[in-house]
Image (cartoon, rainbow, N blue to C red):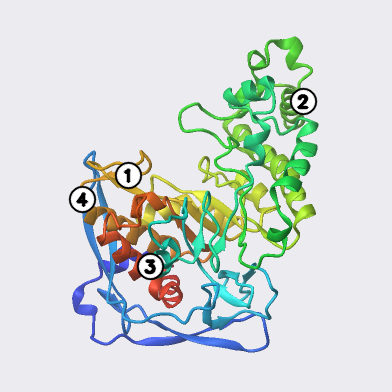
Amino acid sequence: MKLLAIILLPLLMYSGAPRCKKVAIATGRKGKIEKKVPAIIGNPFVDDEFSIQTKNITIIGGKIKATNTLTGVNKTARFSKYGGDMDERIGNAKGYFTTHKDPQTGIWNIVDPDGYAFYSAGLNSVKKSSAVNIADSLKGIYINTLGSWSDAFSGMAYTPNLNLGLNYKNTTARTKSLYSKRIFPAFDIQFEHFCDSLVAIRISSAQKTDPFLLGYFTDNELTIGSTYTNGPGLPFFLDVANYGGQALADKDPNYLAAVNWMKSQHGGVLVTPAPNDVAAWTGVLAERYYQIVCAAVKKHDPNHLILGNRMNLDLTNPYLMNASAKYCDILSLNNYHVWTDAEIDTRLDAVEQANIPYIATEFYARVSDVPLTSAGYAVKTVQDQADFFETYTMAMISHKGNVGYHFFNAKELMGTTGTWLNPIQAPGSFRKINRDIYRLRSYLINKHK
């Protein structure tokens, strides 16, 4: 039963102090850890500290969004030096971040280098400043991960972006032209050598053995899936005009790959692609891309996780998610334009079915009169902005496959001086969500059916 449905249960069902049941959580070793999580008994949801309330927010444009907010967080988790949960150990320390799926509960976890369950609460584009101790500010709101485009800080997990595909598409006039026409040239013979050479340069010797390195992003929002405004990818691959005419198309490995694949699906005949062809081709392209980039990364650094391409398109496409899951350790989703529990459930269905953990690596709502970026929803007040953060993160955390969120981005919280721009959101909402995030996660997963 979904969160919203339960919140609307009659108030008279609530009977005071919550009943709790014990849930056994496998640890990857002999034995189990028992955590107390509340039984679902009425409205509002409560345990000995958590209380979740629902209200409606009217965003810019007039749409009304059901929004959940959190109150009554009074405890602080026992954090490992990496930010992991010292009350849930999963196996022995391996010295680097790994992943683990509990075979009984189906819950995914990142495991920190000391063997503790780790949820990646992150922030993108964090830069060092001479004016303020940024690391202390982030630890004050219980951020444990430096997201993409961030400087590395001592004692915090970080996530470099290798930008392999985005660098490759800029190598020649031809590759630039193809990419501008929604064709990522992953089938070029030289793409594999390019990735191997660039990874050898981009990954330093120090990074290869750094326990605080969570994992690598391979790119950011590389055009692999269908686009919001320019249509699906396969017809672009099949349009000979995009290659400069039939003669040049017949020599281009990307055109030939698309043609040969279409013929293999339709008895040797090249036909106009149907919607399922378009969706399936996205998986073919993703598999080619990830097979090459992941092999290059693992060759030069077998110790650390591969976090994917920070996908922002076609996130409901099962072909894309299944192909990506074959090669990545964690998928990264720049997951905009969803707000309610139902919207987020629908968006995440394909990645949940792909049986791989994932991080929401970008999301954001901006206050309409003080926009710093154009990303995400436009809301009316700073309180609405903070409430969106709470409802979004709680909805993500409630999914068994979700192992982190990375907020977009640092300048939206603290500008360039380290001063909180919206104290209601940070430190307020960030501190509420992150302070006892592991027990909150158990609680939310337990009632998300």
Circle 1/circle 2 CB separation < 8 Å:
no
The amino acid beneath tag 4 is: Thr
Residue at the image position 46 percent from the left and 33 percent from the top: 228
**Nearest to N terminus: mark 2 or mark 3:** 3
Distance in Å between CA atoms under marks 3 and 4: 21 Å
Name the residue that disc number 2 marks.
253
Residue at the image position 51 percent from the left and 73 percent from the top: 83
Residue at the spot of label 1? 377
Q: CA distance from mark 2 to mark 4?
A: 51 Å
Question: In whole angstroms, how far apart are the C-alphas of marks 1 and 2?
Answer: 40 Å
> Label 1 vs label 4: CA separation?
12 Å
> Neighbour class for label 3 at 10 Å: few (<14), some, many (≥20)?
some
- Pinpoint residue 253: horizontal percent, then vertical percent: 77, 25
- Between 123 and 336, the one nearer to me in the picture: 123
Mark before the other along the chain sequence, 3 or 1: 3
Picture coordinates of residue 256 (x, y %)?
76, 24
Q: State the mark number for residue 285.
A: none
Cβ atoms under marks 1 and 4 closer than 8 Å: no
Asked if the residue at tag 1 contacts the one at tag 3, i.e. Cβ–Cβ closer than 8 Å, the answer is no
Q: Secondary structure at mark 2?
A: helix
- Pick whichever of labels 2 and 4 is earlier in the sequence: 2
Figure check: 290 above or below 175: below
Q: Above or below — where is 426 with respect to 245?
A: below
Q: Which mark is residue 141?
A: 3
Q: Is residue 339 visible?
A: no
The residue tagged with tag 4: helix, strand or loop?
Answer: loop
Q: Identify the image quadrant of residue 271.
A: top right
Q: Nearer the viewer, mark 1 or mark 4?
A: 4
Amino acid, disc 1: Tyr
Comparing labels 3 and 4, the label whose residue is closer to the camera: 3
Dot placed on the residue nearer the N-terminal end, 1 or 2: 2
Residue position for label 4? 381
